[in-house]
Structure formats: C-alpha cells, structure tokens
Amino acid sequence: MASRSSRQSYSHNHNNGSSSSSSSSTSTSSSSSSAAVSSRTTVGHAQPAHNSSGRPKPPSATSRRSVTPNSRTQSFHSDQEPRRVRVAIRLRPRNAEDLLSDADFSDCVELQPELKRLKLSKNNWSSESYRFDEVFTETASQKRVYEVVAKPVVESVLNGYNGTVMAYGQTGTGKTYTVGRLGKEDASERGIMVRALEDIIASTSPASDSVEVSYLQLYMESIQDLLAPEKTNIPINEDPKTGEVSLPGATVVRVQDLDHFLQLLQVGEANRHAANTKMNTESSRSHAILMVHIRRSVHEKVNDEINSQEKGTKSDLFDGNGIPIVRKSKLLIVDLAGSERIDKSGSEGLLLEEAKFINLSLSSLGKCINALAENSSHIPTRDSKLTRLLRDSFGGSARTSLIVTIGPSARHHAETASTIMFGQRAMKIVNMVKLKEEFDYESLSRKLEGQVDHLTAEIERQQKLRDDDKYKLEKQLRECHDSFAEARKVLVTRSEILEKENIHLESEMKGILNELNHQKDLNNLMQDKVSKLEMSLKHSEQHQLENSTYQKVLADTTQMYEKKMAELIKQIEDERAHSENAEEQLALMKKLLSEQQKSIQGQKQIDELALKLQEMYQLHENTLSELQSLKSENKDLLLQKEKLNEELHSVRQRLLEQEKQRKGIENELFKLKRAVPENENDFEDKKSYMKEELSKGSSEFGNRMGSYRSNPLRENISGQRATIAKICEEVGLQKILQLLTSEDSDVQVHAVKVVANLAAEDINQKRIVEEGGLDALLMLLRSLENTTILRVASGAIANLAMNEMNQALIMDKGGALLLAKTASKTEDPQTLRMVAGALANLCGNEKLLTVLKEDGGIKALLGMARSGSSDVIAQVARGLANFAKCESRGVIQGHRIGRSLLIDDGALTWLIANSNTNSASTRRHVELALCHLAQNEDNAKDIISGGGVKVLIQISVESSREDIRNLAKKMLRLNPSLQADMHAR
Ligand code: ADP
Ligand code: MG
C-alpha cells in the first residue's frame, strides 16, 4: 500500500520527537543510525505517546477528546490508537528577494533530508539541529510533499478518522503554494488540497459515499464563508456532549468531481482576495480552512481495506446486528496566516490590540500547542476560534500532519527559528485517533422507512385485495342469498302450481273417471242396445219370414176364396141358366097354361107349376143375394189384399232403412268393440231363443217358400212386431193357439213359430200363458216327435221361462220334467240348446232350485252337456252359473244352508273339469259358478276334494275378467277352509 510505504518513511522515526537543544555533534552522533534514533526516548518533554516500557499510554488529552455516544470507538479500545502529530519541514527555494538581500548572508538553515534533520545556524560557529518527521529541501516536488505529508492523513480520513493537514510558516514561505496551489497551468504544481480531493474522489463512490466541502476564512476571529462571502461571522457550534465542532451556518457543497472542486477553490480564492481587498488587509493575515466531510457506508470492500484488527470487529458488528454502519470523517486542510509578528510584517497603522486580535487565533494555537507539548493540565482551546476549530486536530482524535514552511534567508532567522520551534513542539503532541464510525441510523431509518413504506404499501395492497375479496365474497354471498331466495320462491310457486295442478289433475281424473264410468254405462247401454238391435233385427227377419208365410197363407186363402167365388159364379151362372131354363119353362108353362086355359084343362097343374116357379124364383133371388154378398166379400178381400200388399211394401221399405241403420249400428258396434276390449256385462240370466231360432230356421222356410228365398228383404223389427201383433189381433191369439193343435203339421209349425215369436215379447207372454199357450206348448213337447216343432216349442218355452212369473207356472205344470224328457229323447243340438236354455233360465229362480233339481233339471243339463255341442255346453254352464249364483245369494241372505244341490248331481265335478274350456262365455260361466260355489263354506270340502282350489287359484290369476279374478281371490281369502288348503299347497 502506497500509504504504508510512505508512512514508513514517516513512522520509523516517530518516537523520536525532536532532539531539541542538542548540539550539532549530538545531532551528528544521533544521526548515525535510524535504529539508534528510534531507540531513543524523548528527554525533557512530556511524551504521552509511549512510556519507557514502550507501551502506548493514553495521553491526558484523551479525557477531553470528543466522544460521541454513537461512536463505536467507545466500545472498542482497539479503535483508539495513539498517533503523534507528524511534522515535516519544507524549505522554499530562494527567490529574487532572497538572492538580493542575502548577498552578504549565508543560509541560516542547512537541511539534512536523509537524516530528516535541519540545522539552524545560531551564529557563524554554532548551529542547532532539529529532527522532523520529514525534511523537504527546496527541490522537493509538490507530489512528494503531498504523498509524505498529506496522503497518509487523507487515507486515514477515507478510513473513517478525522484528519488535519496544516501549513504553518512565515508569510511568503510557500504555505499557500504547498497547500492551496491549484496548478491549473502546471499540474505538477497542484497543492495538497487539490491532490487530497483528487484521491478522495477517486476512492469514494458517489452512490454510497458523499464528499462535501466548506471553504472558510478566519480573520479577526470572524469566520467567513468563502463559498458564500455574504456569510460572515459564522458561529461555531460545539456539541456539549460529543464536543464535536461544526459550522452549521457554513455552505456545504457536495463535490461532484475534481473540476467542480477546482471551481469551488477558485471561487473561494477569488472571494478571499476580494474580501481582503475590501477589508484592506492581506490574505496572509487570514486563515483559510477547507473542511472536507466524508461520509462513507461501510461495505466489505471497506472492511478489506482496513487492518485486520479493525476488520474482525467491524465485520462481527456489521454481521452481528445488520445495522448499516457509516463513517463520518472530516478532513481539515488549513492554510494558516503568516506566523511572523505583525510589526515585522509591515502592517503599519494598526493598533497593538488590533494587531493582537488579528493574531489571536495563531498565538492561541501556539499556546495550545505549548500546553499540549508540555502536557499541561490546561489547554486554552477556547481562547480563539482557530483553536476551537482545531480542537480535534491537536490533542484530539484526528490524525494530524503539519507542514512547516521556512525560507532560506538569514534575514528572517528569528522567524524561522520560532517556526521551527513551533514545529518541534507540535511533534510532541500525541492524538488518540478514533474511528468516526457509527451506526447509520439515518440510513437504517431510511432503509427501515423504505421497508415500512414497502410493507405499508404491501399491507395496503393486501388490505385492498382482502377488501376486494371480501367485497367479492360478500357480493357472491348476496348473490347466493338472492338466488337462494329466488330458487326458494320459484320452488314455492312451483310447488303451489304443482299442488294446483295436482288438484286440477285429481279433479280431472275424477272427471275422467266419471266420464269413464259414464262411458262404461253408455257402453253397456250401447251393447244392450246393440244386442237388442241384433235381436230386433233377427226378430224382424223372423217377422218378415213369418209375414211372407202369412202372405203365402193369405195368397192361398185368396186363391181358395177366388176358387170358391168362381165356383159360386159358376153356380150362379148355372142358377141363372137354370133360371133362364126355368123362365123358358115358365114361358112354355105360361103358353101351355094359356093353351090349357084355353083348353081349360088341368088348372091344378098350372097352380103346381106356378108354385114351383115361385120357389124357383125364390131360389134365384137367394142365389143372387148370396152372389152379391160373395162379390162384396171378394171385393173386401181384394181390398184387404191390396192393403196388405201396400203394407208389405212399406214394411220392405222400412226393412231396407232398418238394414241401413243396422249396418251403421254394426259399424258402430265394431268400432265400439274395438274400442272396448271386453264388456263388463254380467252373464245373461235370460235369453230369448225363439227369435234367433226362427231366424236360424228361416232358410228352411225360405226353401219352402221359394219366391222369398231370393228376396233379401228384412223387416223392420217394430213393423214386424206390429204385423205379428196385428195378425194376432186379426186372427186372434186363441185361433193361433188352436192352430197348435192342428192336424196339419205345417200349420202347427207355422203356429208354433208365431207363438214362439210372440213369446219372445214380454207383453205377449202373459196373454199366451193366460190363453193356454203354455199348456199347448207343453202338450206339443209331450206328444210330438217332430224335431222342428220340438225345437221351436222348446224355444217358446225357453222364452216364456225368461219371465219369473212364468217360471213357477212352468215348473208347476211339470215343465222341468218335460224339458228333461225332451232332452233325453233328442240329439238335435238346436233342440238341446233350446231345452238347455229353458232349463238355464229356470235355474235363475232361487225358489225353484230344489224342485228343478228334484225334477232332474241339473241331471238333464249335465246330460245335454255330453252332446258336445259348444252352444249347448254354453247354456249348461249358464244354467249352472245361474243356479250357483242363486244358491250363493240364498246362503248370503241366510235362507239356504248346507252344501250345494249341484254337487250331488256331479255339477261341481263337471265345472272343475270344464274350467279350461276354450269357449270364452262358457268358461266365464264355469268360473262364475265355481266362484259362487266357493262362497258357501259348506261346499269347501267338496271343492277341496275335487281339486277346485287349484282351479280357483287359476281363475284368480288367469281369468280374462277382472271382476271374476277378484271374486275368486275374495272367495279364496274369505273361505277359511279354502284358505287353509291354499296355504297347505
Ligand atoms: P506564503 O503563502 O507562505 O505567504 P507563498 O506560497 O505565497 O507564501 O509563496 C511566496 C512565493 O514563493 C510565491 O511566489 C511562490 O510561488 C513562491 N514559492 C514558495 N514556495 C516555493 C517553492 N517550493 N518552489 C517555488 N516557488 C515557491
Ligand atoms: Mg499564503
């Protein structure tokens, strides 16, 4: 390090203060070796730097040192280092004046730069030798002077110590040259101020460090700002605690670069000159003070630069608590006023006091130096502004170098001697240098403030974000609430709507149900109507047939009558011829009479003839009247025939219409049947047989009637009924019933058919029975073997058996027995069907059940079932169902007890065996019969033993009719025995 090497030249003597009052011989001997010099101790001077043991001892001045509480020097002993004030001497080259004046004088000083000694001649034979820290000959360069004297101080200042470089000497010896020379024209002439700032600027960084300067002049105890000359008498501020001296009123300029500093110096110089001119004084009377404030932040780099002892503690501290450290050091470069006495400087006209005042600061400095050098207890620092300003430089904490300038001229011997003595005394002062380092609370505070600001901003940002989030969340919450309320509202309205809808649907459903029931009723009605229409149609066809038969009969009758009439006419003609003959005979007789009258012979004969004639005439008259009546009768008959024909025509017309209507109804029926899968009609209790039978038999008649076969005429039912009723009225029911007993089987057939047909109508049934029709029909069954008559008669009885009133009568008259007998004597399925139908109708009367069973009705039914005809079996099943139903009704009503009458005759077995029949209607009746039988607990045993439970279960599941399924389920459920048997399965 440059500073070290330059310091070496300084320090190897530093303990040697000076060897004042030593003779030249002494000085000679003492200059023998540097080692000897360095081993010497100061004698006769209070030397605070080292005691005899060589250990540094704090000088007494330490107690007066400026100690700032913030200063780290307090905490670290090692920071306080004793350092003596260094003093160098510089000899100015001779100038013209010297050369002139010293023509007869030899030089009064002799320099021994290698020995760092100066010999000052006292007289021609003796001289005194003084040792300095450095001795610059007149040839010494500005650069070397700077490097030896100022640079170590500058470096020290850069490292955080205060420093002072001061020039002391007589006016004109080169103080200003050494210190303040700008060297604008010749760079080699630049003085300490410029070079120091150059080094400082080079060693600091504008980013982290600051270099500020104030430039002041002290004259007559007034401090004037050379950078702002208007500022005069700037007060000195002394911190009572720290002792730190500052000039708060002085301008402080932050130095940007060297040029800037040069400008400042120049301005200061100009101002100094102007001020001195104004005050009519010389610049040599004033002190110029350059204050350089250096503020450096401590970085690693800085730590590297400082010595290891400092380094360790600093980095510990720096690392330890992370508080930034700042070094605030101050460099004072002082160009003192001339040290000569005032009178000698030629300042005439000044009062002594004034002159004293002018030099107060300098003389005060001298006193302080003396006091310090003599280790006096009182240092009169406060006596002048200069000593106050330089308090830290001498006996303080600053590193101080003093350059003492002297001239070579013997003329100024006394001045030179006193100057040298000043230097010698100054060399004895030991300062305790102290690192001006403190925690950079300011920057820390700034940094912390920055952090706080950053954190505050961050917190604010976070707060804002939180607020935003909160707002958003609140908004969402609100929205959620809203949507929830809305959803709830919607739900409520929806549920209300649904409820309303529900109610509406329920009412609609009820309506539909009603409608359905209504439809059902209507449907039933329609079906009834349809079946009635079908029956009526068949009936009308039958009627038509009957009508045609009747017509035929009429035609026959008419023919017969015509024949009879022809015979009668012939008879009349015969009678007429006879009468004519008689008239002729009468005429002849009259002639004869006249002849006889003339002859008057045989009066008696004439009388006889006249009588005979009278008789003949009477006969003729009678015949004529008879003829007349016959003619009228014929006429009537013809009229009647014509009327009948007309009626027939109208009947045909109506039949045609009826046919059309029927087709329409058939279509409708077809549609209805398609629309309604199964009608819920109960099984039929009654059935009119004759009508369908007659319609079935029509082909027979048609064949016989021939001409009617091809005619597709169908009669209007009511018309036909009316016709038959009319015939019945005209011919008389009695007559027709009589015809039943006719010898002619054809007549019988026709009559029985008419009767059967009439019996199909409720209104006729009573009359037929009252007028003996039932007896006649039973008679026919009893006596006749004619299949057709048997069948038709059976049908008629079956029809009559539809009427409950007739049923008892039929039974009373042995109808059941007769029917059973008829069943046994024929195998004609149609007849059997009629008989079975009649019996089935009788089965529907509860009062007759016992008699019917006793009369063999059930056996007859079961016997007929063996014929195998499905129609017959259907009737058998219907009969059994009727029977079982009546029985179960009786059981329910409580007037029938015991097991079914059907069981003994094997009906139950038959029913169970036929429960799987293919015919839907038969099966339905079988199922119903079984269900009704199952209703009676007394039948249970037989049902179970006959395997009926299984069939009932099957019915409850498989029956095509829901009501029957339900009935079967009900029976199975209600009849405990069946229930038990079912569970046993
Ligand atoms: P002071 O400031 O002590 O009154 P100056 O610095 O003004 O003296 O010097 C007086 C004169 O001597 C100036 O003209 C200066 O240039 C000159 N001078 C002083 N010292 C030297 C030197 N070492 N080399 C050359 N000239 C010098
Ligand atoms: Mg000067």
Image (cartoon, rainbow, N blue to C red):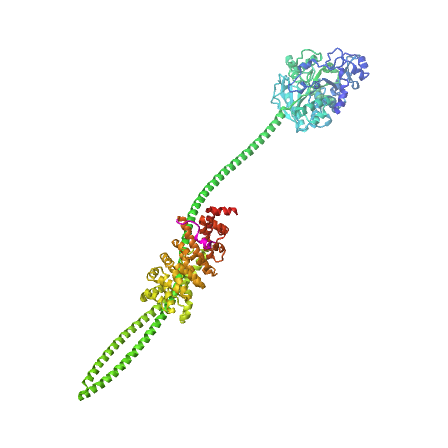
Q: Is residue 102 left or right of residue 978?
A: right
Percent position (x, y) of residue 588? Answer: 23, 86
**The residue stretch that appears in magenta:** 895-908
In the displayed structure, 124 sits above or below 203; it is: above
Which of 13/480 is in front? 480
User: Which quadrant would residue 592 be assigned to in this image?
Assistant: bottom left
Ligand 2 is found in the corner quadrant, namely top right
Does the rendering let one see residue 333? no
Q: Is residue 524 left or right of residue 293?
A: left
In the displayed structure, 529 sits above or below 344; it is: below
Which of 227/581 is in front? 581
Q: What residue lies at 36% left-to-right and 71% top-to-bottom?
A: 552
User: Which quadrant would residue 303 be assigned to in this image?
Assistant: top right
How many marks the image carries: the answer is 0
User: Which quadrant would residue 773 be assigned to in this image?
Assistant: bottom left
Percent position (x, y) of residue 375? Answer: 70, 12
Q: Is residue 394 magenta?
A: no
User: Quadrant where the N terminus lies?
Assistant: top right
Q: What residue lies at 25% left-to-right and 81% top-to-bottom?
A: 579
Percent position (x, y) of residue 783? Answer: 39, 65
Percent position (x, y) of residue 722? Answer: 34, 64
Does the rendering let one see residue 253? yes
Which of 968/196 is in front? 968
